[in-house]
Amino acid sequence: MNRDVAIVGVGMTKFGEHWKKGLKELITEAGVKAVEDAGISGKDIQLIVGGSMSSGMFVGQEHTGALFTDYLGLSPVPAIRTEAACASSSVALTTGTMAVQSGRYDCVVVGGVEKMTDVYGNLATTALAGAMDRDNEAHFGLTFPGVYALMAQRHMHQYGTTREQIAMVAVKNHENAMHNPNAQFHRKICVESVLKSALVSDPLRLLDCSPIADGAAALILVPAEHAKKYTDTPIYIRASSQASDTLSLYMRPDITTVGATISAVQNAYKQSGLKPEDIHFAEVHDCFTINEIIASEDLGFCKKGEGGRLVQSGETAIGGKIPINPSGGLKAKGHPVGATGAAQAVEIVEQLRGEAGGRQVKGAENGLAHNVGGSGSTVVVHMLSRNRK
Amino acid sequence: MNRDVAIVGVGMTKFGEHWKKGLKELITEAGVKAVEDAGISGKDIQLIVGGSMSSGMFVGQEHTGALFTDYLGLSPVPAIRTEAACASSSVALTTGTMAVQSGRYDCVVVGGVEKMTDVYGNLATTALAGAMDRDNEAHFGLTFPGVYALMAQRHMHQYGTTREQIAMVAVKNHENAMHNPNAQFHRKICVESVLKSALVSDPLRLLDCSPIADGAAALILVPAEHAKKYTDTPIYIRASSQASDTLSLYMRPDITTVGATISAVQNAYKQSGLKPEDIHFAEVHDCFTINEIIASEDLGFCKKGEGGRLVQSGETAIGGKIPINPSGGLKAKGHPVGATGAAQAVEIVEQLRGEAGGRQVKGAENGLAHNVGGSGSTVVVHMLSRNRK
C-alpha cells in the first residue's frame, strides 16, 4: 500500500426490525455515532462512501450516497454509493481506503445501510435474488437458501461434515450474540433446536439462516500518520483486498470452496505480511451456517474439509484458538445486507480497542473480516490491527 | 492530483432500444470495444469500476460489478459498482481515477450500463424517481419532468428566458446527433416541432425530454507515465471532481442554479489550472433542455441568466465559440442513465483524438463533461485534455 490508513471512529445502529426508522434515520444514526466517536465535526469530512445493496428494490430509494450526505447535513461533500450485493459496504471500505491512499482525501466516512423489513410482500427474497445471475439462476427458481444448501450437501458428501457440526455454527453464534447489545437475537439455542427448526432448503433449516434485518454502520478513515491526532487507539488497515468469481454457482469447478475467498485472502496475507496464525479472531460471512465452515477452511484457519470438525472442537468459540464471529455473526447479530461489511469492521475495531465487553477476545491484536456478495461472486477481506506494521 | 491518469481506450454501444440485448450483452460489447481500442488483453486489467443506476428495479439484477467481470471473463479481478443516479458512471470514472492515483492499480476499466426499455409497465418512471427524495418528493406525485419544469418556469420568470430559446437546445442537439452513428435519434427537428409536441409538464414538452434508452460505454485508464506504451494519442484526465446537494429541490435557496455544478466545476478549474475560455467544447447534462441552459451558466460559459441567449446566438453549435453537446447530448444521443457519464467521456476522447467525423470540433484540445444525478444532488465534472499539463 502507498499510504497507510487508520480507522479513528466507528458507529452502528442496533440490527433488527426498526419499524420506526427508515433508510435515512438509520444512516444518520450510524454516521453521527462514528463522527462523535472520532471526535470530529462534519466540517472535517471530505468524502462519503456508502454501501447499500438494493435500496431501490427494498424501499424505492436509489442515490443513497447523496442521501447520506444530505441527511448528515454535509453538502457539497461528494458521495459514492458502492454496491456488491451483501458485500456492498466492504467494497465501500476498500473504496474509502483507496481514496485515502490516493492522497486526495484526508478524512473519509465509510458506511453501509439496508432497510429490509416493512417492504412490499415477498420483495426481500426477490431483491436478494438480484445478487445471483438473474437469467441463469433465479429464473429457474433458485434462491439463496437453495444455493447454500447445494454447497452444504456437497460438503457433507465430500468431507463427511455432519448436520450436527453445521448446527454448531448457529449455536456458537447465538451464544456470542448474548453479549452484543446491537445484535438482533438474544436467545441461546442448542443443536437440537436447530435440527428441529423448519426445513428451508435441505439440509438447511430456519436456524441455519441469517435473518432479514434493518441497520447501518459507519467508520471514519484517515491517513495513518494523522491518526494519533484523533485517538490514542487508532486501528490500522493492514490489508484491503477484493476478488470476483462467476455469478452462477454451476459455472464453478468446485462448490465446496469459494475461489474468490482464496484469491482475496491470499492477496490480503501478502499485503499485511500476516499469516493465518497471526489472526487472533475473525468476523466471517455466515449468511448460512455452512458458509462459516467453508470460509474457515478457505481463509486458512484449518485444512480443506476440516471446517466442521473445527467448530465441533470449540476452537472457534471465544476463548478458543481462532474465535469466529464473536459479534454473533450474520446469523445472530443480523444481516441488513448493505450494512454487514461495515458492521464487521466496527466489531473488529471494538475488539482491538478492548471495548467488546462480555464477548471480548482477550489480547487480540489482529482481526480479519470476510464479507461475501452472492454465492461468492464478490469476496472482500480486510485485516485490521492495533499495530501499524 | 498525486499521479496523473490517462485514457487509452474507449468503446460504446449504440444508444437506443436494444430489443435483443440485455444488461450483460451491452456491458460486454462496450467493454470489449474499449479493450480492443486500447490494444490490451484481459490479463492487463486489474480493476473494474462499473456504474449503473437502477439495474435492480429495471431488470432485477444487482451485483453488476461482478456481472461485468463475469461476462468479460475476467474473474478474479475485483469489481466495484458505483451508483449516483444518472451520474453513476461519472462516479465510476472519479473512482477509477482515484484507484490509479492510489498507486494500487495500473490498468482500470471504467464503464456504465443501463437497460431501460423492455421493463415492466411504468417501472422506468418509478425507478427514476428513486433518484429524488422518495419520501419528500415522489410520494407527493413529483416526477423528474416536474422537477425540471419547476426550474424552467422559474428561469423564464427570473431571467426572461423564452420558450423558443429552450427549444433551441433540442434543435441543436438533434442536428449534432445526425453525425453520430451511436445516437438514438437521427432526425432533424425545428423550434416549431418542439413547441407543437405533446405537453409533458408545463412548460416542458415531449421534445424537451431526453428519451429512455439502453446502452453501455467503457474506458481504459492507466497512469499517465505509461500511456504512450498504449497509444500515440492518450487523453489526460486534468480534473475529476464531484459535489453533492440536497436530494429535494424545495430545500435549495435558488432553483435556477445547481449548487453542486458550481462546487464541482470550481474545484475542477482549480485541479486542472484551466479557465472557462480554455474549454473548447463540453458535453453537458441536458436530461431536459432547460438543464443545458442552466448548466452553461453554472459552468462559467456565460453569465447567470444568459444561457437562453447563448444558445440563441449559435455559439453553442459546432463551429461556435463553445460547442455544447456535439454528440447530440442526452436529448438526441439518448440517456441510458447509468451509461451516460461514461459515454460523455467517450465522446470527449473521440473529439480530442480528432475521430468525431461530421460532428468534429476542430482543433479541440480541452473538453469538459458535466453529469448530473437527480435534480443536481450529485454533479460530476471531468476535464480531459490532449495535454498532460
Image (cartoon, coloured by chain):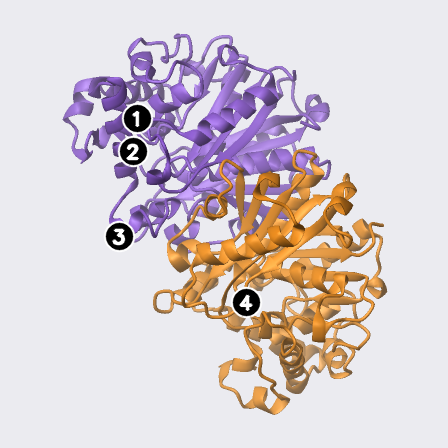
Chain colours: A orange, B purple
User: What type is the residue that disc 3 sits on?
Assistant: Gly
Of badges 4 and 1, nearer the viewer stands 4
Report the residue that reaches farthest toward the left.
B196
* Residue name at image x 69 percent, y 77 percent: A158
| Distance from Cα at disc 4 to Cα at disc 1 | 45 Å
**Residue A60 location, quadrant:** bottom left
* Residue name at image x 65 percent, y 41 percent: A107
Is residue B313 among what the camera can see? yes
Tell me, yes or no, whether the two marked residues, 3 and 2, touch with CB atoms within 8 Å.
no
Protein chain holding label 2: B
Tell me if A210 is positioned left or right of A278 in this view: left
| Distance from Cα at disc 3 to Cα at disc 2 | 23 Å
User: What type is the residue that disc 1 sits on?
Assistant: Ile
Protein chain holding label 1: B
Specify which label sits upstream in the sequence, 3 or 2.
3
User: What type is the residue that disc 4 sits on?
Assistant: Lys
- Label 1: element kind: helix
Is residue A202 among what the camera can see? no
Specify which label sits upstream in the sequence, 2 or 1.
2
Tell me if B331 is positioned left or right of B237 in this view: left
Tell me, yes or no, whether the two marked residues, 2 and 1, touch with CB atoms within 8 Å.
yes
Q: Tell me the quarter of the image containing the N terminus of chain B.
A: top right
Judging by the rendered image, the residue that carries numbered circle 2 is: B148
Protein chain holding label 4: A
User: Which percent across, then down, holds residue B33?
Assistant: 53, 33
Judging by the rendered image, the residue that carries numbered circle 1 is: B290
- Label 3: element kind: loop
Mark 3 neighbour class, 10 Å CA radius: few under 14, some 14 to 19, many 20 or more: few
Tell me if A310 is positioned left or right of A146 in this view: right
Protein chain holding label 3: B
Tell me, yes or no, whether the two marked residues, 2 and 4, touch with CB atoms within 8 Å.
no
Q: Do labels 2 and 4 share a chain?
A: no
